[in-house]
Amino acid sequence: MSLSVHIKKHFGSFQLRVDLEHPEGITGILGASGCGKSLTLKCIAGIITPDEGKIVLNDRVLFDSERKVNLKPQQRRVGYLFQNYALFPNMTVEKNILCGLCREKDRQIKWQKMQQAAEFMQIEDYLKSYPQQLSGGQQQRVALARILVSEPELLLLDEPFSALDSYLRDHLQTQVKKILKSFGKDALIVSHSRDEIYHLCEYTALMGQGRVLRMGRTKDVFACPGSLTGAMLTGCKNIAAARKAGEYEVDVPDWGIRLRTAQPVQGHLCGVGIRAHYFHIKARENIYPVVYSAEIEEPFETTMLFRYEKQREGTPDIWWRVPKDRKPGRFPESLGIAPQNVLLLYPEQEDV
């Protein structure tokens, strides 16, 4: 499966400018609210028409502004799972699923496919129920069943877990991943939750201000987000302006330190990031004196806030997060960072 998206769309002062290549499997688009994630999905599905560009799915052209191609949503073979699932409230679960089989003319085949989808999703006991009688997780499975019976080439999932509580959300993420693999469907998932993207997706595209900032295998993207926005999206708590000091060294003026890096430093470096879990008492490099500030207790971890000895006044405290069973009895006098854990951040490319 392959999906190629290269489009532009103006929405007043906001400009969507997306260049995205989805190779296979499950790709996540991670971004803050308002960055253009859902708009991108709607352009792929044909709900919104881009101003210019091209969208190709499995060598089929869905949209091409130059060639005047713009397939209708029902012609695109794309399944769209809306944020609120968009089930018909006046229809039973059975009839909602049958809506996904509107192109099938044989009534017996239609009925069999509906039954098979309901059994697979474990909702066969609710076929005569209405959406409002179901839990959020059950509604999601009905919506997925309705999409999958239409045999789409690609699934688009728009914030699929945002309406669920945290316990159900964690439980259903595993279920959805199994469902997609069992059906052999490729999917594009948008979310503002880095945990959802990390758990579900083989590939990740970081998105900010209408553009894809970085794309690659999920673990690679989280290990090296590349930009200030990317570092924040992937959960980095400690970010500061920095400048190149050598081929493998950076100065961080706000923290009053110089850090050695594992990656060569480019001249246009603008900042560094250090994840809260990366500080270590026994680190062999980048060791500097620190001063305790405060701490935040969480159910299974403790976040200790500190400052470097020469850190500028008025700058934010630095986060050091440790599991509760590894919390030191006495706050250390110094902490270090392995060079490979120093994230190098560069300016985001400007639109041209």
Image (cartoon, rainbow, N blue to C red):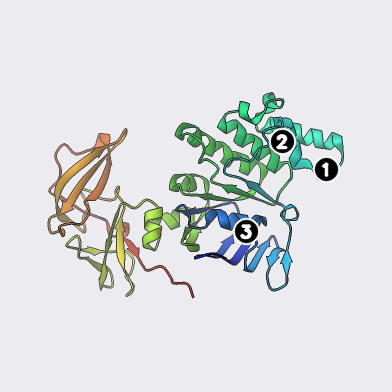
Closer mark to the observer between disc 1 and disc 3: 3
| Secondary structure category for the residue under label 1 | loop
* Mark linked to residue 104: 1
Q: Nearer the viewer, residue 309 or 10?
A: 10
Residue that badge 3 annotates: 43
> Which of marks 3 and 2 precedes in the sequence?
3
Residue 281 located left or right of residue 24: left
Residue 331 located left or right of residue 341: left
Residue that badge 2 annotates: 96
Q: Residue furthest front?
A: 12
- Name the amino acid, label 2: Asn
Residue 192 located left or right of residue 319: right
Q: State yes or no: discs 1 and 2 in contact (Cβ < 8 Å).
A: no
- Name the amino acid, label 3: Cys
User: To which quarter of the image does residue 263 belong?
Assistant: bottom left
Image quarter of the N terminus:
bottom right
